[in-house]
Image (cartoon, helix red, strand yellow):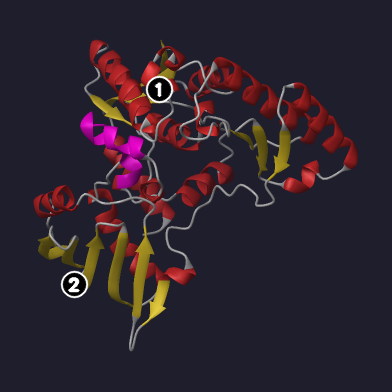
Amino acid sequence: MNINVKINKVKEILKNKKIALAFSAGADSTLLAYLAKEAGADVLAITYNNQIFPTGFLEFAKGRADEIGIRHEVIEGNFLDVEEFVENSPKRCLLCRNLMYGAIKQKANEEGYEIIIDGNNITDLTHDRPGILMKYEYEIESPFIDAELETYEIHQFLEENNIPYSKSTTCLATRVKTNETVTIDKVNRIDYGEALIKEKTGSEVVKLREENNVATIEMENIEKILDNETIDTIFNELKSAQYDKVLLNLKAIEDNDNLIEDDELEKGSNNLILRKKLPFGINISETAEIIQENKNEHLSNVEPNEEIGYIKLNVDEKESKIFRDGKISIENNKNKEDAKESLVKILPLIRRTV
């Protein structure tokens, strides 16, 4: 399915609907707002301000909603007042989405909007983001997943159509190492550090990760920081912010994930076998139940084995297995695109463990 077919499918899903949109003004929610407006939908964009987003986040979101021509509401909260959140356990993302989606759903219903959508896309289902479980809990719809849109396709469409979006919409708590307490001081100096690096290098995408009082800088293009004067300025400023060490990650930030990498395809005797490993465990019983409920011409012969820990099934008549440890195998693929077409049939039905 090419990108234009997918985009038109999203428009058809949204056409003339009354919808509330979880809106950050990042790539996904910006494109969703843009397409919803084009499709004649009555759109209420709702932004949850948890007080730990990068500087300028809220102002940009307000501006983009106004430019697109949709109504915009802001919900104010403060996650730093939530003890379980600041403890920063591996379940922090789950708690964040629970609070955020719960508040957005309540606001949407108060305003008379019963359909709530978000910008999750098919690529997001391959990432370690436990908060996505709250999408199912609160019955949030994801048109990009339904249309099988990938991250790179969304970015490509935005760039080709000159649609501006924010590249800094990630909660700053994600920069603090898991199990290290999130504090206002840490959030403020991470925000300060990222803004400083952007200013000195002209970079749009910068992440400053903090662990044991060590700052690690990640950028989309590290060449922008590699001159002595810039390095000295940034180093001295971050040392003044009380970091013990300042490091630079030599691997650039990459936004355009591939749904399938070449090394995940293994040559069989007469075909290609996809062997993909998701970065999380899979709830076999729940996933099997959902697949059974959604059986269609693409999915058949579903045989779960909870004791051993896998689900055997046919996807597009190809022998496939989904394993508890996150592995997926799909046999008898003609090429990478053929394997991808089958993979996207099961990704939305998988339920992860936390």
User: Residue 334, percent across and down?
Assistant: 35, 78
In the image, residue 28 sits, relative to residue 66, either above or below, namely: below
Q: State the image coordinates of residue 131 (x, y, percent, origin top left).
A: 34, 35
Magenta segment, principal secondary structure? helix
Which residue is at 59% across, 39% downward?
162
- Looking at the rendering, the stretch of residues picked out in magenta corresponds to 130-145
340 over 288 or under it: above or below = below
Badge 1 crowding class, 10 Å Cα cut-off, few under 14, some 14 to 19, many 20 or more, is some
Q: Indicate which disc, 2 or 1, sits on the residue closer to the N terminus.
A: 1
The verdict on residue 143 being magenta is: yes
Q: Amino acid at mark 1?
A: Phe
Look at the numbered disc 2 and give the secondary structure of its residue.
loop
- Lateral position of residue 342 relative to residue 26, left or right: left
Q: Residues within 10 Å of mark 2 (few under 14, many from 20)?
A: some
Q: Amino acid at mark 2?
A: Glu
- Residue 98 position (above or below residue 125): above
Query: For this rendering, which residue is in front, 117 or 350?
Result: 350
The local secondary structure at tag 1 comes to helix
Disc number at residue 85?
1
Q: Which residue is mark 2?
A: 317
* Residue 146 x, y percent position in the rendering: 29, 46
Residue situated furthest bottom in the rendering: 269
Q: Position of residue 101 (x, y in %)?
A: 31, 24
Residue located at (32% from left, 63% from top): 341
